Each structure stands twice: as structure tokens, then as C-alpha cells.
Image (cartoon, rainbow, N blue to C red):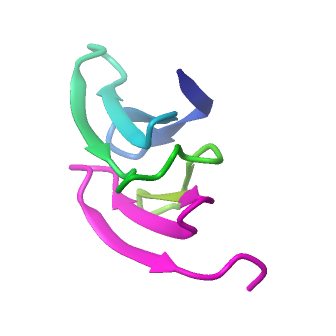
Amino acid sequence: SQLGIPVLTPDNGVAMGFRGGWLRAWDRDSGDLRWERDLSDDAEHLTCAPVIDNAGFIYVYIRNRPVVVKVDSRDGSVVWAARFADGD
């Protein structure tokens, strides 16, 4: 099932996080799936809706790892992942 609300990308796309650790993006006009990325790495699920910055990068928090992942909205590639301890 989906998690949170979708985010609009600058290249006429829409992205949404899903339980199971998936992040997917579609074309807003055609509805065609552009890409999907499994961010789970054995994580239970994404724990918040993704957010997007003005440059088109999507940020996702996965609590049980815990990690923040930066994803390029154009192709779904992971730019970086920052792991930290809960409470930091």
C-alpha cells in the first residue's frame, strides 16, 4: 500500500513511497511508470512520505535502518544514503 501523499517532480512526474521500501515515479500526463527503486535493503518499510527539493531530489526516511536516502527524481538513482543512530 502507498505511504503518505505523492510529490510532484519538476519534469512532469509524480513520485510516491510504498510500504515494503519501494519508491515509484510516473509520468503525470500518461500515467506510465518511469522508474521504481527498492530502497528497503531489508527494511520493513518507508516510514514517512517522501519530500522533494527545488532541484528535483527526493528525500526518504527509513526509520528501522535508520537512514535518509537522496534520490534523483529523473531516473530513480540513489545519490547518497546517510545512516545515523536513533536520537541523533
In the image: residue 56, left or right of residue 6: left
The residue that appears at 52% across and 69% down in the rendered structure is 67
**Quarter-of-image position of residue 85:** bottom right
Residue beneath the point at 37% across and 22% down = 28
Residue 4 in the image: state x and y as whole percent: 65, 33
Q: Is residue 2 above or below residue 21?
A: above
Say which quarter of the image contains residue 37.
top left
Q: Position of residue 60 (x, y in %)?
A: 52, 56
Choose top left, top right, bottom left or bottom right for residue 77.
Answer: bottom left
In-front residue for pair 41/76: 41
Q: Nearer the viewer, residue 44 or 83?
A: 44
Check the picture and name the quadrant holding the C terminus: bottom right
Q: Residue at x 35, y 56 (%)?
A: 41
Give how far across and how far down residue 62 sits, in percent: 55, 57
Q: Is residue 11 left or right of residue 49?
A: left
- Left or right, 48 with respect to 65, comes to right
The answer to whether 70 is drawn above or below residue 27 in the figure is below
> In the image as oriented, which residue stretches furthest toward the bottom?
88
Region in magenta: 61-88
Query: Residue extending furthest top?
Result: 30
Q: Is residue 24 magenta?
A: no
